[in-house]
Image (cartoon, rainbow, N blue to C red):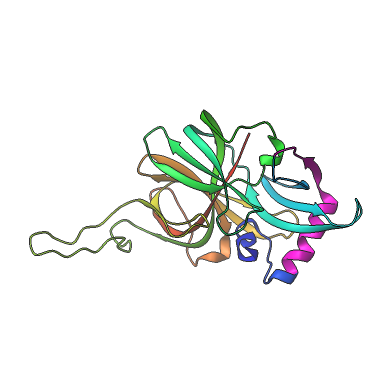
Amino acid sequence: MSRHFSAIGFNISNDAELLDFARECVGRSDAYQSDRRDFSGAGFRWEAGRGIEVWTAVRPLNGDEDYEIVSCLPAWRCEETLNLRAWRLLRHPLDKSELLMLARLDDGRELSFALPNLWQNPELPARGMDGGVHLAGLALEAEFSTFESAPRLLDERQADSPVKTLDSALIPLDRDNHYRVAGRILEADETSNIHSGVRLWKIRLDIDGLHLPLIFPKDISSGAPAPGLRFDGLIWLCGLLP
């Protein structure tokens, strides 16, 4: 998970650095507690500016002054809110201290994404209908090209059909909310992490009608995004409840 922080401008290279960073974030954060079953401890939100957030979950060890870091997650509160038709909350299959949301969109597609800020919504039921979420992709790899020169996403050769290609895709890769993504760039703008000084791109991507905001460092690719180009990359999908 330390690698994922690069998408919002924090360069953390290993788990030891991540632990130190998490402890620093706790000291800068607002605290939230929840009475949810099996959700003891507290969540700490550091608003790092320009929509960048870090969520650290802790549980007590030997009294109020001693605690253990159980998770530290990056997040980006984009301006857009995506409407959900239905959703339910899940424990991360590999890390029970992290929570996911499995959601169905209006067009029937289903997405799974990390949900770091459930601490702010302690009364949210385990499942429901109709809701909104600030859904964004934190990009770990990025490539920009014209559609004519874009890499193929699907290469199925059959005797009676030509090679098939896809112009857009959102392909789940694992149970940790990583997706292979391709789509047309609708908007591209620059921002920065005001603490590290790292320059960032924030773009909005059209993925077959789904408009998904992405954020990533400028040095992740040699090129620059621009409206009309195709984005190809690897993202970690993360949502924040309003």
Does 134 appear in magenta? Answer: no
Residue 219 % position (x, y): 57, 66
- Residue 165: tell me if it is visible: yes
Q: Residue at x 7, y 60 (%)?
A: 160
Query: Which residue: 70% across, 56% down?
Result: 72
Please name whichever residue, 139 or 217, is drawn nearer the observer in this view of the structure. Answer: 139
Residue 95 shown left or right of residue 120 in the figure: left
Residue 228 drawn at (x, y percent): 38, 49
Residues shaded magenta = 17-36
Residue 234 relative to residue 152: left or right: right
| Helix, strand or loop: magenta stretch | helix
Q: How many marks?
A: 0
Relative height, residue 143 to residue 84 (above, below)? below
Using the image, determine if residue 67 lies above or below residue 83: below
- The residue at the far left in this view is 160
155 in relation to 25, above or below: below
**Residue 156 in the figure: left or right of residue 1:** left
Give the x, y percent position of residue 147. Answer: 31, 56
Closer to the camera in the image, 93 or 203? 93
Query: In which quadrant of the rendered image does the N terminus lie?
Result: bottom right
